Image: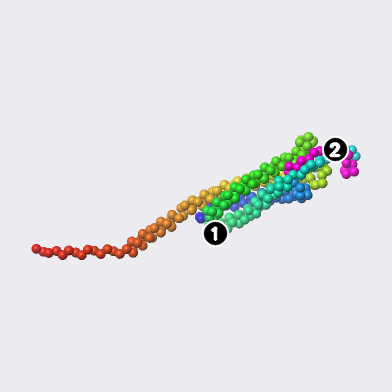
């Protein structure tokens, strides 16, 4: 297929940006999983209680602390991590292919372009679902931490508040917020990649329709010329003798 350099360059840039956004989603999720000892904070449920924990805190008097009734499902965090990792790996592979096509001055076949569109649309819906899950899960965890806004601090400020859990909560909001923004950026880039893949498919389809016509016309003209050259010339009829009177 003939190469459309503008579409290919735009697609290559989208792959590079998606790799960066995917890394920004994977790294904070990995840090959050390490801080929470493999548990998922998204959609976790719990309640605040007050009791005398002087032997633990070293302070006299009643202390309010958070009790996690149930941690969130691991799949909620694993889905966001999977989308980020897949985006990084796919962006690296497709970016290399785009550079190879730019160097070789050709593009994907029609079937390969169709598969790229199909895969891009599927991952677009997957990343969109992961973004929604991450956003709703963070809201649910913030409601638990702030006791549905009954505590005198916000969710971001609760990072510096001791929750007296057996996990490290000193940067959970920063990590999950960065992962949330990066995952929505990944979704937007998958939308751009889907549009670019469709445009490349349309370009390949147009080239596929125009390309076979020219060789076929040349073949018909060649066959016609060969048939004219190879056909024997019909003999002229003998001249009728004339009888003079």
Tell me if residue 175 can be seen. Answer: no
Bounds of the magenta segment: 42-57
Residue 98, percent from left and from top: 58, 55
**Badges 2 and 1: C-beta atoms under 8 Å apart?**
no
* Mark 2: few/some/many CA within 10 Å (<14, 14-19, 20+): few
Mark linked to residue 206 = none
Residue 203, percent from left and from top: 51, 50
Total numbered labels: 2
Q: Is residue 65 left or right of residue 127?
A: right
Q: Earlier in the sequence, mark 2 or mark 1?
A: 2
Which residue is rendered at x = 65% and y = 46% of the image?
127
Which residue is rendered at x = 79% and y = 42% of the image?
68
Residue 64, percent from left and from top: 84, 38
Q: Is residue 183 left or right of residue 97?
A: right
Which residue is rendered at x = 56% and y = 57% of the image?
101
Residue 48 magenta-highlighted: yes
Tell me if residue 97 can be seen. Answer: yes
Quadrant assignment for the C terminus: bottom left
Observer-nearest residue: 122 or 245? Answer: 122
User: Taken as a whole, is the magenta stretch helix, strand or loop?
Assistant: strand
State the CA–CA distance, disc 2 to disc 1: 69 Å
Q: Is residue 79 left or right of residue 215?
A: right
Q: Is residue 23 left or right of residue 166?
A: left
Mark linked to residue 104 = 1
Residue 1, percent from left and from top: 51, 55
Which residue is rendered at x = 11% and y = 64% of the image?
244
Under circle 2, the secondary element is: strand
Tell which tag, 2 or 1, sits nearer the viewer.
2
Where is mark 2, residue-wise? 50
């Amino acid at each position: 297929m003939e190469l459309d350099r503008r579409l290919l360059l735009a697609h290559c840039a989208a792959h590079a940006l998606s790799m960066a956004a995917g890394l920004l989603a994977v790294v904070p999720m990995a840090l959050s999983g390490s801080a929470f000892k493999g548990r998922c904070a998204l959609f976790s449920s719990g309640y605040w209680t007050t009791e005398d924990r002087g032997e633990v805190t070293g302070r006299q008097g009643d202390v309010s602390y958070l009790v996690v009734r149930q941690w969130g499902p691991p799949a909620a965090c694993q889905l966001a991590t999977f989308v980020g990792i897949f985006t990084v790996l796919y962006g690296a592979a497709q970016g290399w292919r785009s550079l190879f096509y730019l160097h070789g001055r050709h593009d994907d076949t029609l079937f390969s372009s169709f598969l790229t569109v199909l895969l891009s649309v599927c991952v677009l819906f997957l990343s969109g679902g992961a973004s929604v899950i991450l956003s709703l899960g963070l809201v649910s965890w913030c409601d638990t931490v702030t006791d549905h806004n009954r505590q005198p601090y916000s969710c971001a400020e609760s990072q510096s508040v001791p929750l007296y859990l057996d996990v490290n909560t000193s940067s959970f909001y920063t990590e999950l917020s960065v992962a949330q923004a990066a995952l929505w950026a990944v979704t937007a880039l998958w939308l751009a990649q889907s549009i670019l893949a469709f445009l490349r498919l349309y370009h390949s389809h147009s080239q596929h329709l125009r390309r076979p016509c020219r060789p076929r016309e040349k073949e018909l003209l060649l066959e016609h010329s060969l048939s004219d050259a190879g056909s024997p010339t019909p003999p002229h009829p003998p001249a009728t003798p004339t009888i003079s009177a």
